[in-house]
Amino acid sequence: MIADNYGVEVKKGFVCYMRSNHLVKELKLSEKGFEHAIALVNDVLEVIQKGFYPAATKYKARCVDCTYLKICV
């Protein structure tokens, strides 16, 4: 969004972990990493806009702290 709105190159981003006392981590992005980040944002928007939930993982250890744990199908 910063690149689109301000016409500048974006080389890093930040992730804020809400469930870890708002821990913020800096991420340096390559072109491939940037494209992957855009795809992840689009996946999240699909969940929000369409009420679509991702398929369950076969690795149940990942489910322990998942936000979708109680509604996963």
Image (cartoon, rainbow, N blue to C red):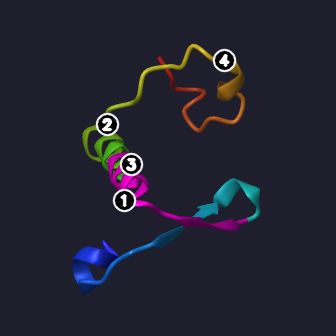
Element assignment for label 4: helix
Q: Amino acid at mark 2?
A: Gly
Tag 2–tag 3 contact (CB < 8 Å): no
71 versus 36 height, above or below: above
8 left or right of 23 in image? left
Residue 60 or residue 7, whichever sits in front? 7
Queried whether the magenta region covers residue 37, the answer comes back as yes
Is there CB contact under 8 Å for labels 1 and 2? Answer: no
3D distance between C-alphas at marks 2 and 3: 22 Å
**Residue type highlighted by circle 4:** Lys
Q: CA distance from mark 1 to mark 4?
A: 32 Å
Which numbered disc, 2 or 3, marks the residue closer to the eye? 3
**Number of the front mark, 3 or 1:** 1
Say what amino acid the circle numbered 3 marks.
His
Q: CA distance from mark 3 to mark 4?
A: 24 Å
Mark 1 element type: helix
Q: Earlier in the sequence, mark 1 or mark 2?
A: 1
Q: Could you tell which of marks 3 and 1 lies nearer the N-terminus?
A: 1
Pinpoint residue 65: horizontal percent, then vertical percent.
70, 36
Residues shaded magenta:
22-40
Q: Residue at x 30, y 48 (%)?
A: 42
Q: Is residue 4 left or right of residue 72?
A: left
- Relative depth, front residue between 32 and 71: 32
Identify the mark at residue 60; answer none if there is no mark: 4
Q: Quadrant of residue 52?
A: top left
Mark 2 lies on a secondary structure that is loop
Q: Amino acid at mark 1?
A: Glu
Q: Disc 3 and disc 1: Cα gap in Å? A: 9 Å
> Could you classify mark 3 by the number of other residues whose Cα lies within 10 Å: few (under 14), some (14-19), or many (20 or more)?
few
- Upstream in the sequence, badge 4 or badge 2? 2
